Amino acid sequence: MINVGIIGRNFGYKVIFSALKKIKDIKILGFSVKNKKINNLPKHVKIYKNWKSLVDDKKINAIFISTPPKTHKEIIKYSIRKKKHIFCDKPVTVSLKDITNICKEIKKKKIINYVNYEFNKIEAFQTFKNKYFPKIKIKKVDINWIIKVPSKKRSSWKNIHKLGGGNFFNYICHILFYLENFFGKIEICEKKSKKLKSKFELRAKLLSENKKTKINLNFKNIEKKSKIKTYHKIVFKSDKGKFTLFTKINNLFDQFILLKNKQVIFRPKKINYDFRLKPTYKNIVSFKNSINRRVNGNPNFEDAKRIHYLIEKLVKF
């Protein structure tokens, strides 16, 4: 049995806690939230107002971190000292320097670590990668992602890069991770970004590790009042036609579908819950298995360090 504690309320309760409840051989012992109550918790779950007290609990083997990214560094370093395994939401830190130092420290202690990048565990992505990707030769990839600027009412860290949010940590990190999941280490060939008040645009040309696949990336963050429709579309142009991963981004129930040319070849079942729950569940199962095998799985902190490196190559802040 792996005893765990959760630090952080929103995503920590809505997604991580909901996923953990469904997994065998994991017991939730503690929850750390600041000045807030959490309803409907099992009686055995202890509420800690101070996250250090939760990490200090000798009964807890693993820590789940779901707090604003600027707080991650301190929590992770303390958890390493207390020899706790760590499951952390992205981004792990707010700088390449911090994640590099953490990777060195955690390697010495042989602590299992995992990062909750979700896209590679989304059903449409897994269907494409496992069923079609090995059988085709991809010449070109076109990525278009248009999102609307988050409301000012949302937590400020989600909008500010130096706090761990913004376009890159909140969104483009996902693109970089799933591209390397498909093609190995990618190379940045050209890049051009533009920022006007709340709007942001990035265009980049990338190349796969084997130098055989060209990748065009187009990301736009548009104003909330704009009439332009949001969507996330990835087109793989191959020797056997076009394969497209596509989703509208109207709410947290929207999921990716998979098309070959213009025909839908995979459509997930409709859901009435946060689409991040399933991929997070799969990541937690992988984390649990890594702890039991005492071998790090993927994505881990080294993967997160690679994403930080690419982000700093794409844009200077």
Image (spheres, helix red, strand yellow):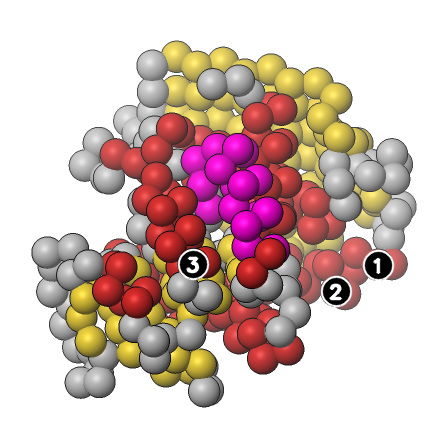
In the figure, 125 relative to 41: above or below? Answer: above
Q: Which residue is mark 3?
A: 81
- Which residue corresponds to the image point at 70% horizontal and 45% vertical from the top-left? 180
Q: Which residue is mark 1?
A: 134
- The amino acid at mark 1 is Pro
Q: Which residue is mark 2?
A: 130
Q: Mark 3 to mark 1: distance in Å?
A: 42 Å
Pinpoint residue 266: horizontal percent, then vertical percent: 63, 63
Mark 1 in CB contact with mark 2 (< 8 angstroms): yes
User: Element at badge 2?
Assistant: helix
Magenta stretch mostly in which secondary structure? helix
In the figure, 183 relative to 132: above or below? Answer: above
- The amino acid at mark 3 is Arg
N-term mark: 3 or 2:
3
Mark 3 in CB contact with mark 2 (< 8 angstroms): no
Q: Which residue is at the front of the view, 126 or 311? A: 311
- Which residue corresponds to the image point at 34% horizontal and 29% vertical from the top-left? 160
